[in-house]
Amino acid sequence: MSVTVVGSLNEDVLVAVGRLPGRGETVVGRAAVLAPGGKGANQAAAAGRLAGSGVAMVGRVGDDPAGERQRAALADAGVDTALVLPTPGHPTGSATIPVEDGSGENLIVVVPGANGELTPDDVDVPAVRRAAVVLLQLEVPLPTVRAAADAASGTVVLTPAPPQPLPPELLRRVAVLVPNEHELVQLAGADPGPRAPAELAALARTLGAAATVVTLGARGALVVPADGPVLLQAPPPVEPVDTTGAGDCLCGALGAALARGADLAGAVREAVAAAALSTTGPGARGALPDAAAVRAVLPRVPAAVRVD
C-alpha cells in the first residue's frame, strides 16, 4: 500500500459557539482551541491512522512553530513528512472555525500562507510518481494540483474544494472526484438548491471524471461510477460532536481502502464509516478512527441502496 497526499497544512483555531453567526452578525464564543488542520493534512492523518504505514504528505508550512506542530501531528498519525517543506518568509496556513454546540456544524475561513507557495517542482517526486493512490485538493495552487495529477501513475482522487473551475485536462486525469453536494452543483454550473440523489448523479456525470463520490454529510455518500448503478451509502448511527474535517476523513479513508485494493463501492462503505466515527470528537482530527474501529462499526453500516 502507498498513499501520497499533495495539499494544504493549516493550524486551525476552533471556536465553540452556541449557534453559528449569520451574515454581518457577531456571536460570543465559549472557548477557543488550536488544532492541526488543512484539507491535505487532514486526509493524510486519516489515511495514516487507518493504514498504519505507507502514507506520505507533500506540502509547505512556514518556518515557524506552527509548521513544526503540523509536522509533528502528522508524524504522530504515522505519516511520512520528509516532503513537508519549510517556507521562510511565509507563515503556516491557518483556518478559523466556529463550531456550533449540539449540531457540530461549522463555518471555515482559511488563510493559505505557505500553502500558496507549493510549486509544480515540489510535487515532481517519487512519492507522487509511484504512489498507488494520490489524494489532491484545491487549497494549494491549481498548477501544482495539475502537475501532481500528471506525475501520478496510480489512482488520482481529487476533492474539488474550495470549488473553482477545473480544466478538462485535469478532470481527465482524475479517477475519483469527491465533491460535496454544494461543490458539485457549483462545478456543474447549476442553480443552487436541494436535489434528489438521482439529480445529483446526473450532474456528476456531466463533469468528466471517471467516477464521482458525492459526500452528503449525515446522509452518507453517493457513488456515481462512469457506468453501472448509482449507489447511496448511508453511514452508521453516531452522536456527532463536531463535523469539522469529516469530509477529509472520508477522502483519507477512501484513499487507504483503494490503495489496499478495495473496489469503489467497498471503499466508500469503509470511508463513510470512518467519517461518521470522526465526528464523535472535537476538531478535524479529534476522533480519527484506526482500522480496528472501522472494522468494528462496519456491521452497523446500512447496505447501499441503488438509485434509479
Image (tube, helix red, strand yellow):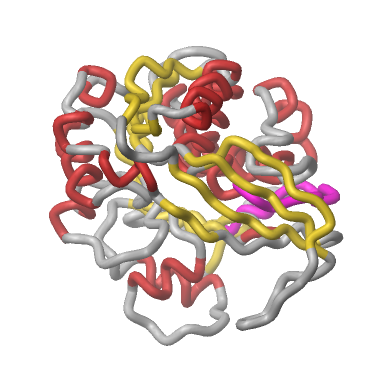
Task: Look at the picture and state if 4 lies above or below 303.
Answer: above
Q: Residue at x 53, y 37 (%)?
A: 42
Is 136 on the left-hand or right-hand side of 67? left
Q: Main secondary structure of the magenta part?
A: loop
- Residue 239 sits inside the magenta stretch: yes
- Residue 23 sits inside the magenta stretch: no
Camera-side residue: 183 or 119? Answer: 119
Extreme residue toward the front, this view: 89
Q: Residue at x 52, y 31 (%)?
A: 66
Residue 138 placement (x, y as % from top left): 35, 52
Is 251 on the left-hand or right-hand side of 235? left
Marker count (numbered): 0
Q: Residue at x 44, y 67 (%)?
A: 183
Q: Residue at x 53, y 84 (%)?
A: 193
Is residue 256 visible from the viewing direction of this image? no
Task: Look at the picture and state if 53 lies above or below 303.
Answer: above
Is residue 60 visible from the viewing direction of this image? yes
Which quarter of the figure has residue 92?
top left
Camera-side residue: 25 or 158? Answer: 25
Is 243 on the left-hand or right-hand side of 5? right
Q: Magenta stretch?
A: 232-245
Task: Look at the picture and state if 236 lies above or below 180.
Answer: above
Camera-side residue: 76 or 15? Answer: 15
Is 105 on the left-hand or right-hand side of 253? right
Residue 5 placement (x, y as % from top left): 38, 32
Q: Tell me the quarter of the image containing the N terminus.
A: top left
